[in-house]
Image: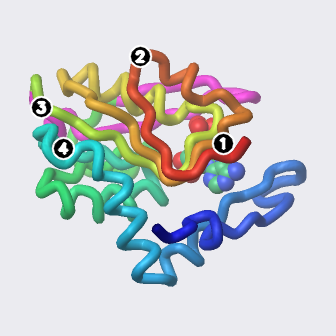
Amino acid sequence: MIDLTRYIRDVPDFPKPGIVFKDITPLLADHQALRETIARLVDPFRHKGVEVVAAVESRGFIFGALAAGELQAALVPIRKPGKLPYRTVSQSYELEYGTDTIEVHEDAVRRGQRVLMVDDVLATGGTMAAACRLVRRLGGDILAAAFVIELAFLSGRERIGDCTVHSLIQVK
Ligand code: AMP
């Protein structure tokens, strides 16, 4: 098994002072590490009938697209406001200072479809909690939220609530 932590680069003070940014580009640059990442991301869900992978902008798209291919599922992009061309539903969520919003096409998930949520990093959990709310509003049945990296010290799991969390790397 590859030690995936060797492919995550810590970049201190990006995008602002005090944040240690988890740079996944070394992982993307190594095809074996990337392939193993996707395999480990989807392994618990291979025979669970996942119909839709919902991926959160923007690095979530990379892992989500590969995971959808691996699971032979549809890919649904969850995007920042104003990016999706068709009719959307949107969900706002609280940040430390202010609020943010994400959107999805209103016909992206059908009632009862089995959905795997994907993003690169679970930090405070605000983004994924809002993404889950969006998918549930469309009637999606969420199996779990899968992340490459979980910043466990931020307790994002708790914010996501009743959703099962699957993460490959936990940062204490
Ligand atoms: P949060 O809503 O706090 O869980 O933040 C999650 C989103 O912000 C994800 O889409 C991540 O890509 C991004 N993010 C948050 N913190 C970091 C970090 N330290 N390094 C890289 N990305 C991060």
Mark 4 or mark 3, earlier in chain: 4
Foreground label between 2 and 4: 2
Specify start and end residues of the magenta stretch as a single range: 90-110
* Left or right, residue 18 beside residue 98: right
- Callout 3 crowding tier (Cα within 10 Å): few <14, some 14–19, many ≥20: some
Q: Which residue is mark 3?
A: 113
Q: Position of residue 120 (x, y in %)?
A: 50, 53
State the residue in front, 72 or 101.
Answer: 72
Position of residue 114 relative to residue 54, above or below, is above
* Callout 2 touching callout 4 (CB < 8 Å): no
Report the residue that reaches farthest toward the right.
Answer: 17
Foreground label between 2 and 3: 2
State the residue in front, 77 or 159.
Answer: 159
The image quadrant that residue 131 belongs to is: top left
The Cα–Cα distance between marks 4 and 3, rounded to whole angstroms, is 7 Å
Give the structural element (helix, strand or loop) at label 1. strand
Tell me which amino acid carries mark 1: Leu
Q: Position of residue 80 (x, y in %)?
A: 46, 46
The Cα–Cα distance between marks 3 and 1, rounded to whole angstroms, is 29 Å
Tell me which amino acid carries mark 2: Asp
* Callout 4 touching callout 3 (CB < 8 Å): yes
Q: How is the image coloured?
A: rainbow
Q: Which residue is mark 2?
A: 162
Q: Is mark 1 within 8 Å of ligand 1?
A: yes
Which quadrant of the rendered structure holds the C terminus?
top right
Give the structural element (helix, strand or loop) at label 2. loop
Mark 4 or mark 1, earlier in chain: 4
- Callout 2 crowding tier (Cα within 10 Å): few <14, some 14–19, many ≥20: few
* Callout 4 touching callout 1 (CB < 8 Å): no
The Cα–Cα distance between marks 1 and 2, rounded to whole angstroms, is 18 Å
